Amino acid sequence: MSLDINVYTKDLSDDIIPQIVKRLNDYEMVVEVHPDFSFENQTGFLPFKFRLKNPPLEVLNDKELISGFELYIDDFNLQEEKEKLKPKLSFIDKLIGKKTTEIPFASPAIEDKLKNFDKVITFVWHAGDSFELRFASLTSAILTELTNGICYYPADDIWYETKGIVEETYKEIKAYEQSLKGKEIKYHEFDEW
């Protein structure tokens, strides 16, 4: 099973990578991103080496772990996305001059912000590693905050704006991780990049 989060933004450069890592380190872990990571050429799995400062289970104490998520960066144009949502007219409908109705991509307030964005960054995580949720959720929230973007969780059709997104995300992650029992937690020990 996999789920995804989309971050819509205009400003995206490698200059913010150190800021992302610094912010990740604010949340009870010591993190390193893969040394070759760049927004310019990233596609697929993005690994993070980390050690939890206050792990939910004793078995994780002092362990160097590896986790991450899939990351995809695409161009975004609100008007083009809205065109894709329009239903196709049948031949008869076209002959009689029927017009297609516009389907909203999001609420008018969200669309008003989305029209200024030209990138969508998709974070995909899988259930095979208990910490992929931590990294996909926190990194997407931090990126939303740093770029003043908008975050979207398609599975539940929820749009998140910048204010308080990182702290709220961390609370949810902590609750999830603390709910895991010993055999439920799935992790990978770090070996090498």
Image: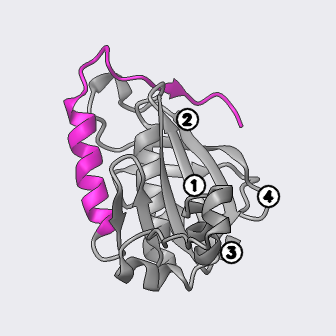
Mark toward the viewer: 2 or 1 = 1
Specify the label residue 41 is tagged with: 4
Furthest-top residue in view?
Answer: 183
* First to last magenta residue range: 165-193
Left or right: 100, with 152 as reference point: right
The answer to which of 6 and 65 lies nearer the viewer is 6
Specify the label residue 13 is tagged with: 3
The answer to which of 144 and 135 lies nearer the viewer is 144
Q: In the image, is residue 181 part of the stretch drawn in magenta?
A: yes
> Crowding at label 1, few (<14), some or many (≥20) Cα neighbours within 10 Å?
many
Q: CA distance from mark 1 to mark 3?
A: 16 Å
Left or right: 61, with 41 as reference point: left
Q: Is label 4 in a helix, a strand or a loop?
A: loop
Q: CA distance from mark 3 to mark 2?
A: 24 Å
- Counting from the top left corner in percent of width and height, residue 74 is at 69, 62
Let me know if residue 24 appears in the view.
no
Q: Is label 1 in a helix, a strand or a loop?
A: strand
The residue that mark 2 highlights is: 66
Q: In this rendering, is residue 33 above or below 20?
A: above
Let me know if residue 46 appears in the view.
yes
Identify the residue at horizontal 58%, vertical 79% (top origin).
117
The first of marks 4 and 3 along the sequence is 3
The residue that mark 1 highlights is: 122
- Counting from the top left corner in percent of width and height, residue 55 is at 31, 36
> Crowding at label 2, few (<14), some or many (≥20) Cα neighbours within 10 Å?
many
Identify the residue at horizontal 56%, vertical 85% (top origin).
116
The first of marks 1 and 4 along the sequence is 4
Name the amino acid, label 2.
Ile
